[in-house]
Image (tube, grey):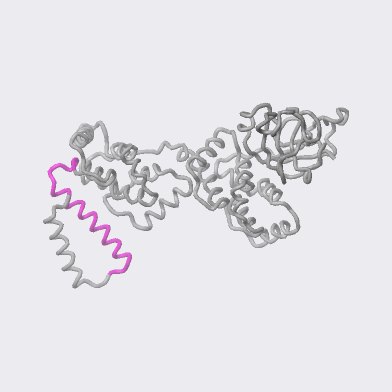
Amino acid sequence: MISKKIATVALTATLACSLCAPLATPIQAAQSEVRGIRAAAVMSLNSISDPVEAFITDLYTNLLNRNPDSKGLISWKTSLKNGQNNAASIVVGFVKSREFQSRSLSMSDYISVLFKAILGRRASEGDIDAWREAIYNGASRMKVLEGLLGSREFNSLCSKYGIQPGSYKSTEYTDVNSKVSGFIARLYRQCLDRKYDDEGLLTWVRAIVNGEATGTDAARGFMLGNEINSRGLSNSQFINVCFRALLNRAPDDGGRSAWLNSLNNGMSRADVVESFIWCEEFANYCNSCGVKLSPKPVPQKVSNTRDDDDDDDDGWRSLGTFKITAYCPCSKCNGTSSGITYSGTRLTVGRTVAVSKSVIPLGSVLKIEGVSGTRVAEDTGVSGRTIDLLVSSHSGAYEWGVRYREVWIKD
């Protein structure tokens, strides 16, 4: 650390030189600042008897914002000197500690603090912007730590301290599966106009990596969900989002004009999304991110529950994509325990669905993508392009959640 006397001398010399030096450009000033900080670190190193102690003390000062306690200082210093720990493992220990985590630093402050602690200098605006962008694109905060600990700058600083730098690789699930994380993070930014929440990102990434969801599911969920609907996007804005979120590019004039014309002439947004997610460009984008797609739905050979003799494939007409929710026969879901549907039939799992009468006529036989067999529109209680699927239990309804599926009707 620079003593008050050394700091005063250095400041006086700097001021004296500045009086006769020509004005520097912003780039020259920034370079000079970094050189000055590094020089100060070297001066600090030369002014103390134990460089290892200086390294540990700097970590306490910059990461925990306090002076080291003697027990902690001795413990860390001993483990570094005897090879039990290297510089990287000690830094990771500090960053993962409850004390550091309890500081609840903002993203920019977190990046700034790591730069000062690990590289011995202030982070430039460019440094902060670059790492903020990486985090917005799905990287965890531990990925920042990985990047700084693996830098030449950190290795050079460790050489000055005479300590082994070591290395660190983030094991955060979103970092291990960084391409999938980037795919989901982009959907948050483009569809919802916000950064992902950590839990939401992790849930989607796990589901896709484990095969519980696909890029098709994610696209429908983000493009047709309540949150994007609440943004009140115009048709023009919605088309822009389709291109940027699903094709990872800005819309071309011809494509944008054609889709906008379709929307303005009555095509539903759900059908527009379906067209995008089954195009080759979306498939290529998903493939580049390591994200699998759902198989393209094809109406299966099914038996008509109203007429078991009529079991051919003819007569099925696609209604496009619907929001599919679930409910059970309990009074909480139905408002009554009678077990009777709006149309007077008995609630029957495996047959009954609730629909909006203005969208699907009661009595219609339906096939829902991903749901075996057929269903009959017997109940009401939903609005718009929503279908409520009757399941056997309340927990089953929660487990189903909200999904978006193509629906066919038997003409």
In this rendering, would 206 be left or right of 87?
Answer: right
Q: Is residue 393 above or below residue 110?
A: above
Residue sitting at x 59%, y 58%: 250
Residue 38 within the magenta-colored segment of the rendering: yes
* Quarter of the picture holding the C terminus: top right
Which one is nearer the viewer's eye here, 30 or 104? 104
The segment highlighted magenta reads: 24-53
Instruction: Describe residue 349's horizontal placement relative to residue 283 as left or right.
Output: right
Work out whether 80 lies above or below 222.
above
- Where residue 402 appears, as percent x and y from the top left, is 63, 39
> Which is nearer the eye, 204 or 151?
204
Pinpoint residue 93: horizontal percent, then vertical percent.
31, 36
State the predominant SS element of the stretch in magenta: helix
Residue closest to the eye, 169 or 107: 107
- Image-quadrant location for residue 24: bottom left
Q: Say whether residue 128 is left or right of residue 349.
A: left
